[in-house]
C-alpha cells in the first residue's frame, strides 16, 4: 500500500465530514465572493472545491516530508552499538572515531 493512501483516505473523510457540517449554512447564505447567479452554480461542488484546495493532498503534504533521527542521552553502550555506529558514519562520514576510550585521565607532560 502506498504510504500516502491512508493519509489521503483520512483527508477525504475529514473533508466529507466538514462539507456535511458546513453545507446547510453555505446553502442558506453563500459567501459573497461566490457568483451564485450563474446557471450551473452548485454550492456542493463549490464548497468541495474550496475545502479541497485548502486541505491539499497527501502527495503535497508528504512531498517535502523528511525524518531525522536525533540521539539523546548517548551512553557508552550506544557508542558501541553497530546500528548506531552505521547511522553516524552514514550521516557524518568525515567524523572518524565516535569516542576515545582510555583507562584514566591522560597524563600531563612534566613541567620543568
Image: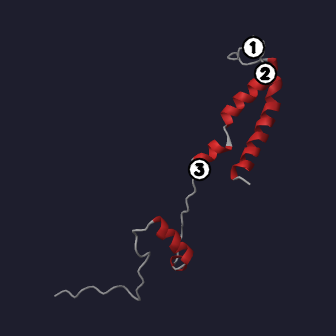
Q: How many marks?
A: 3
Query: Spatial distance from mark 3 to mark 1, Cα to Cα?
Result: 39 Å
Task: List the residue tagged with mark 2.
Answer: 43
Which SS class for mark 1? Answer: loop
Could you say where residue 38 lies in the image, as x and y percent from the top left? 75, 12
Residue 10: image quadrant is top right
Bin the neighbour count of mark 1 within 10 Å (Cα to Cα): few under 14, some 14-19, many 20 and up.
Answer: few
Give the side of residue 48 with respect to residue 88, left or right: right
Residue 16: image quadrant is top right
Mark sitting on residue 36: 1
Q: Residue at x 22, y 88 (%)?
A: 110
Looking at the image, do the residues carrying marks 3 and 1 touch, with CB atoms under 8 Å apart? no
Give the side of residue 52 with respect to residue 92, left or right: right
Task: List the residue tagged with mark 3.
Answer: 65
Give the side of residue 13 with respect to residue 95, left or right: right
Query: Spatial distance from mark 1 to mark 2, Cα to Cα?
Result: 8 Å
Bin the neighbour count of mark 3 within 10 Å (Cα to Cα): few under 14, some 14-19, many 20 and up.
Answer: few
Q: Earlier in the sequence, mark 2 or mark 3?
A: 2
Instruction: Decide: is 47 above or below 73.
Output: above
Q: Earlier in the sequence, mark 3 or mark 1?
A: 1
Residue 67: image quadrant is bottom right
**The N terminus - image quarter:** bottom right
Bin the neighbour count of mark 2 within 10 Å (Cα to Cα): few under 14, some 14-19, many 20 and up.
Answer: some
Could you say where residue 18 lies in the image, as x and y percent from the top left? 78, 34
Query: Spatial distance from mark 2 to mark 3, Cα to Cα?
Result: 34 Å
Q: Residue at x 74, y 24 (%)?
A: 46
**The C terminus - image quarter:** bottom left
Could you say where residue 57 lies in the image, as x and y percent from the top left? 67, 40
Nearer to me, 49 or 99: 49
Q: Residue at x 66, y 33 (%)?
A: 54
Mark sitting on residue 11: none
Amino acid at each position: 500500500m502506498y504510504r500516502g493512501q491512508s493519509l489521503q483516505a483520512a483527508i477525504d473523510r475529514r473533508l466529507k465530514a466538514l462539507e456535511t457540517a458546513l453545507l446547510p449554512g453555505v446553502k442558506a447564505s453563500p459567501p459573497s465572493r461566490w457568483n451564485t447567479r450563474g446557471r450551473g452554480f452548485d454550492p456542493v461542488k463549490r464548497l468541495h472545491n474550496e475545502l479541497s484546495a485548502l486541505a491539499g493532498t497527501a502527495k503535497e503534504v508528504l512531498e517535502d516530508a523528511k525524518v531525522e533521527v536525533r540521539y539523546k542521552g548517548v551512553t557508552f553502550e550506544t557508542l558501541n552499538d553497530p546500528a548506531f555506529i552505521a547511522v553516524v558514519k552514514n550521516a557524518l562520514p568525515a567524523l572518524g572515531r565516535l569516542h576515545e576510550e582510555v583507562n584514566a585521565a591522560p597524563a600531563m607532560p612534566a613541567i620543568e
